[in-house]
């Protein structure tokens, strides 16, 4: 279904809670939101899909439009299925068309209850629940959980909406609870935060910027429960440099930003490499260049983050494709950053961060993997001691007997500035040596995922949140198809990617950018050139129906 | 503890006669006093410095240090304090760091009342890059970047800090190290943002010591009320005679306490399980 109205109408909340309702019944739900860069007005909509099987993405077509304004009906009527219905606030909109109209006086209901306009969303949730035969008790339960002490009026309105629908409308279908223990219904943003927390994050430093503001919006109100602290400094440069200071003093820290914000952090990112201070950067992609289309998704910052910061230094870049992977990989990024004292990037995007889905999260997959800490004091502490792995035992200010000097300058083992040719190159090599250690470590972790038919000769290659669209497309085409999802981009898992490329007969690359950035990375690391590509950069996730058509063309299916 | 224990093995590359030598000696004395008076353990001292001649102080003091990027002195200092508020942080910046590249951080650290000492080596010139104008360069000063003489109105650092809500605003003079030492002790002792703008010459590119020396006086010896904001503002306007000392000092709750209470994040473990948190998502 689609829920739509203006910004400020509380639609995202309504969609999230509706999805949660389906999730509670044991169904798999997916909620996608689409909104412009404004606070009030405009046109916002969310798409909700629920099914008895795992749902990876919403669909273009809908069986129900829930509208709190006229605009929503006009914009989405063409997406309705043949017997689709339109539920709308009859106080502000009207509908006289071929589809079934379900007028409901939401505004009047709110006025009579002495509520405020945004509460129309609660009355609407009630009506939607009724249309799907969901018990009213569950609606109250969900609203109670969401609003706490302020739930009373919302529950009352949901009841009014529910009863009105019961009296006036025919049920669409009766959704039965299925015997599945509800998994979390969670967004990528929430999952990134939780993964980092489970891997020891104590401090989250950020400056608001869509889409990573979604992480801030979760961490801020929940920081005490998570045992962490959020700080919002003056600007992105302040953010990144503050994170360096906190990590130097021994606190696992994550920075949250978007492509543009990360651009401002370049020098500090380079310093993290130089000074070997472990910091994780969660970078949310959106349509760029520059401010671009701030509230829309993209996958066009891959090459940017891979080449971010001046100079040569090891970095970890991982791109999860769904909230479960976001949880695990954010945790891994934190652990790898600390084990190898190198900056790590969790590369995500608006679609992953802000969409909600039902998906299992196994917290035992992430724990605090210890860093190599300096223990004894047999000899003088050297922050940059040369070792076989390139990793020097770390220590933090406050450790008696140790002097811990970090620096943005090239330096000797003690952390004093160094300008001799031998001294410079030795330390450069020491840092780069860590890359081999990281590669060895990654060989024991999941760096790619294979979906579909492992023996199929037709192979789709993609990364990040495009995963969802491809999995839905595979369910549509019903042909033997293998999907190679690349999770780690740095170090690049060429040991995995090469063999899957070699085994395939036809390969198609699918990316949310127009230059095939993963494709060129694959060529760089494997020598393999993927000619067939499906690329786009329009701010929206791939539509499985359209993607199926493209794959059909590319693979020559009839 | 003897101040010589802070001597570092690094060869000093400041110009002969550089005023930074005097400041360096003062810093080592103050660090030793902090330890000797029981105010801090040596391992709890951290210095942070920017990039420019002054920045080398991180290399020249054998103590925990964070030698950061140009202009970015205060954000790491804030990170260090948020991570572990037991640490005593003294941050050093040049006038280029503090008032050009990194002025935004200075404004916000002052208004937050971050509990760090902030010493600005203000020689009114970019020296390490061989002489260009900074925001405190006087009008008419000729350099490579202003061959016809600087025509930009210089910034008044004391006014800047006063208007940002700094709780300790002082001016020192490198030509009077004894006074500077007493100022630094006061600034370090101050609970909150302790700001000292140190007037100094650059012996190579801006040799102004003699000119300053004849005009300098200690305003704290002339009955200045350090809690009077307007008086502090007025004093900071003086140019004929140049006041040094504490212009303004008030008590205000510090940033770290408001953010963290008594928590030391660096000592805290992570929550053992997020099972309950995950249940909230179902």
Image (spheres, coloured by chain):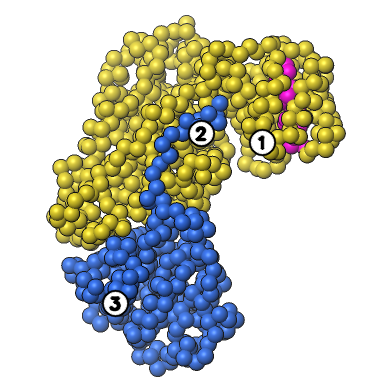
Chain colours: A yellow, B blue
Few, some or many residues within 10 Å of mark 1 (<14, 14–19, 20+): few
Circle 3: element type: helix
Name the residue at 31% across, 37% down.
Answer: A369
Q: Does A118 appear in magenta?
A: yes
Circle 2: element type: helix
Q: Can the viewer see residue A543 in this picture?
A: no
Q: Earlier in the sequence, mark 2 or mark 3?
A: 3
Image quarter of residue A404: bottom left
Which chain is indicated by disc 3? Answer: B
Boundaries of the magenta span: A117-131
Image quarter of residue B179: bottom left
Could you give the CA–CA distance between mark 1 and mark 3, rounded to whole angstroms? 58 Å
The kind of secondary structure the magenta stretch mainly shows is helix
- Residue B273 at x, y percent in the picture: 43, 34
Label disc, if present, on residue B277 of the rendered structure: 2
Q: Does A127 appear in magenta?
A: yes
Task: Report the quarter where the N terminus of chain B lies.
Answer: bottom left
Question: In this view of the protein, which residue sits in the foreground, A104 or B251?
Answer: B251
Name the residue at 81% across, 21% down.
Answer: A164
Name the residue at 30% across, 54% down.
Answer: A396
Task: Read off the residue under disc 1.
Answer: A147
């Amino acid at each position: 279904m689609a829920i739509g109205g203006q910004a400020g109408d509380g639609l995202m909340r309504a969609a999230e809670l509706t999805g949660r309702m389906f999730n509670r019944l044991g169904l798999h739900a997916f909620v996608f939101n689409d909104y412009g860069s404004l606070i009030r007005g405009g046109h916002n909509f969310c798409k909700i899909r629920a099914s008895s099987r795992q749902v990876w993405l919403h669909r273009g077509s809908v069986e129900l439009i829930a509208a709190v304004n006229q605009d929503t009906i006009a914009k989405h009527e063409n997406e309705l299925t043949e017997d689709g219905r339109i539920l709308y606030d009859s106080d502000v909109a009207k509908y006289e068309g071929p589809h079934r109209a379900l007028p409901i006086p939401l505004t009047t209901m709110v006025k009579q209850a002495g509520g405020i306009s945004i509460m129309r969303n609660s009355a609407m949730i009630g009506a939607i629940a009724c249309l799907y035969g969901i018990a009213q008790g569950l609606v109250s339960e969900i609203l109670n959980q969401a609003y706490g002490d302020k739930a009373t009026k919302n529950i009352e309105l949901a009841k009014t909406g529910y009863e009105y629908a019961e009296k006036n409308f025919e049920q669409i279908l009766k959704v039965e609870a299925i015997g599945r223990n509800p998994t979390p219904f969670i967004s990528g943003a929430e999952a990134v935060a939780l993964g980092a927390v489970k891997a020891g994050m104590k401090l989250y430093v950020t400056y608001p910027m869509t889409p990573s503001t979604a992480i801030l919006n979760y961490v801020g109100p929940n920081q005490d429960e998570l045992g962490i602290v959020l700080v919002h400094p003056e600007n992105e440069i302040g953010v990144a440099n503050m994170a360096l200071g906190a990590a130097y003093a021994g606190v696992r820290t994550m920075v949250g930003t978007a492509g543009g914000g990360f651009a401002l952090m370049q020098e500090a990112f380079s310093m993290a490499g130089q000074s070997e201070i472990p910091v994780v950067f969660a970078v949310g992609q959106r349509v760029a260049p520059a401010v671009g289309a701030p509230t829309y998704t993209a996958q066009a910052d891959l090459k940017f983050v891979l080449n971010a910061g001046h100079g040569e230094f090891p970095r970890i870049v991982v791109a999860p494709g769904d909230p479960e992977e976001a949880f695990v990989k954010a945790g891994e990024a934190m652990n790898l950053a600390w084990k190898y004292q190198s900056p790590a990037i969790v590369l995500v995007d608006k679609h992953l961060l802000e969409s909600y889905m039902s998906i299992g999260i196994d917290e035992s997959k992430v724990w605090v993997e210890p860093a190599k800490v300096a223990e004894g004091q047999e000899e003088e502490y050297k922050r940059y001691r040369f070792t076989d792995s390139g990793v020097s035992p770390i220590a933090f200010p406050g450790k008696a007997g140790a002097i811990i000097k970090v620096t943005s300058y090239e330096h000797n083992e003690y952390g004093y500035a160094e300008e001799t040719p031998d001294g410079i190159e030795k330390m450069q090599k020491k840092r780069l040596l860590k890359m081999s250690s990281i590669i060895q470590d990654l060989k024991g972790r999941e760096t790619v995922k294979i979906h579909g038919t492992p023996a199929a000769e037709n192979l789709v290659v993609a990364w990040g949140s495009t995963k969802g669209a491809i999995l839905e497309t595979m369910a549509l085409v019903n042909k033997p198809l293998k999907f190679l999802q690349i999770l780690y981009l740095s170090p690049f898992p060429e040991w995995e990617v090469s063999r899957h490329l070699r085994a395939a007969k036809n390969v198609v690359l699918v990316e949310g950018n127009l230059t095939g950035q993963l494709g060129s990375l694959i060529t760089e690391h494997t020598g393999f050139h993927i000619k067939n590509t499906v690329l786009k950069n329009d701010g929206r996730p791939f539509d499985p129906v359209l993607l199926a058509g493209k794959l059909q063309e590319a693979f020559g299916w009839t | 503890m003897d101040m010589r224990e802070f001597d570092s093995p690094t060869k000093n590359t400041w110009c002969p006669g550089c005023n930074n030598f005097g400041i360096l000696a003062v810093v080592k004395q103050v660090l030793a006093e902090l330890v000797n008076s029981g105010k801090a353990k040596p391992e709890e001292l951290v210095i942070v410095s920017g990039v420019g001649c002054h920045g080398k102080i991180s290399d020249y003091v054998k103590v925990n240090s964070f030698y950061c990027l140009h202009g970015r002195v205060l954000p790491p200092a804030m990170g260090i304090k948020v991570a572990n508020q037991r640490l005593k942080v003294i941050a050093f910046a040049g006038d280029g760091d503090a008032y050009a590249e990194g002025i935004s951080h200075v404004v916000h650290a002052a208004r937050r009342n971050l509990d760090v000492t902030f010493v600005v080596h203000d020689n009114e010139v970019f020296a390490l890059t061989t002489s260009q104008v900074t925001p405190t360069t006087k009008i008419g000063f000729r350099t490579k970047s202003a061959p016809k003489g600087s025509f930009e109105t210089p910034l008044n650092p004391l006014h800047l800090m006063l208007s940002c809500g700094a709780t300790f605003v002082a001016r020192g003079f490198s030509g009077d190290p004894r006074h500077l030492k007493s100022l630094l002790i006061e600034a370090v002792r101050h609970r909150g943002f302790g700001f000292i703008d140190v007037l100094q010459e650059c012996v190579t590119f801006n040799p102004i010591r003699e000119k300053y020396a004849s005009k300098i006086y200690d305003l704290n010896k002339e009955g200045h009320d350090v809690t009077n904001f307007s008086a502090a503002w007025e004093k900071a306007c003086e140019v004929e005679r140049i006041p040094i000392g504490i212009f303004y000092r008030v008590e205000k709750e510090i940033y770290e306490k408001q953010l963290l209470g008594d928590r030391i994040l660096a000592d805290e473990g992570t929550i053992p399980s997020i099972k309950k948190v995950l249940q909230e998502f179902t």
